[in-house]
Image (cartoon, rainbow, N blue to C red):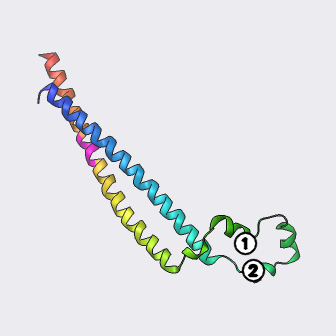
Amino acid sequence: MTTAVAADVIADLRQRRRDMRRELARVRWWRRLVHARRELALAFLAQPDVHSSAALDLSWEALAAGAPTSSELAKAVWPDSTGFTVGSLEDLGALDARLGEYESRVAATLDNVTAQMVRALAHAHRAETATKEA
């Protein structure tokens, strides 16, 4: 392999590797968002009702003085609270599973491209060293 061809192969592999790293970062960002959305849905579905929080003993009431109430927090986090159901959790779980599978494929491709680039760099280095010694 000539030095020019090796340089082209390495440049192509570097670009592919950058593309895979960018895509992997994008997928991981989406997974974090889906996880956060799932946590919000779960918190909404599991939030305490007004009656259970009213039964706090005096020590808890003193500790919680000035703290935001569950209702205040719910209004801040879920302005439209009609959107969450148990089905929402299942849908978000399925979406995360699909993203996870895609993340695995992208990570494997990134590893493969990185290995190809390392081999190409090593080959180019050996060819360059052999040319200098000759």
**Element type at mark 1:** helix
| Left or right of residue 96, residue 81 in this image | right
The boundaries of the magenta stretch are: 112-116
Give percent across and percent down for residue 43: 61, 72
| In the depicted structure, whether residue 70 falls above or below residue 5 | below
Q: Earlier in the sequence, mark 1 or mark 2?
A: 2
Which residue does the image show at 28% across and 51% down from the upper left? 109
Give percent across and percent down for residue 97: 39, 68
CB atoms at circles 1 and 2 under 8 Å apart? Answer: yes
Quadrant location, the C terminus: top left
Which residue does the image show at 82% across and 67% down from the upper left? 64
Q: Does residue 114 show up magenta in the picture? A: yes
Kind of residue at disc 1 = Ser
Give percent across and percent down for residue 26: 41, 51
Q: Which residue is mark 1?
A: 71
Q: Which residue is mark 2?
A: 50
| Left or right of residue 17, residue 58 in this image | right
Label for residue 7? none
Observer-nearest of 80 and 40: 80
Q: Does residue 1 show up magenta in the picture? A: no
Report the Cα–Cα distance between label 1 and label 2: 8 Å
**Element type at mark 2:** helix
Residue 118: image quadrant is top left
Magenta span: chief secondary structure: helix
| In the depicted structure, whether residue 92 falls above or below residue 18 | below
Residue 117: image quadrant is top left
Which residue does the image show at 57% across and 73% down from the upper left? 42
Observer-nearest of 114 and 76: 76
Kind of residue at disc 2 = Val
Query: Badge 1, how many Cα within 10 Å: few under 14, some, many 20+?
Result: few
Quadrant location, the N terminus: top left
Q: Residue furthest bottom?
A: 51
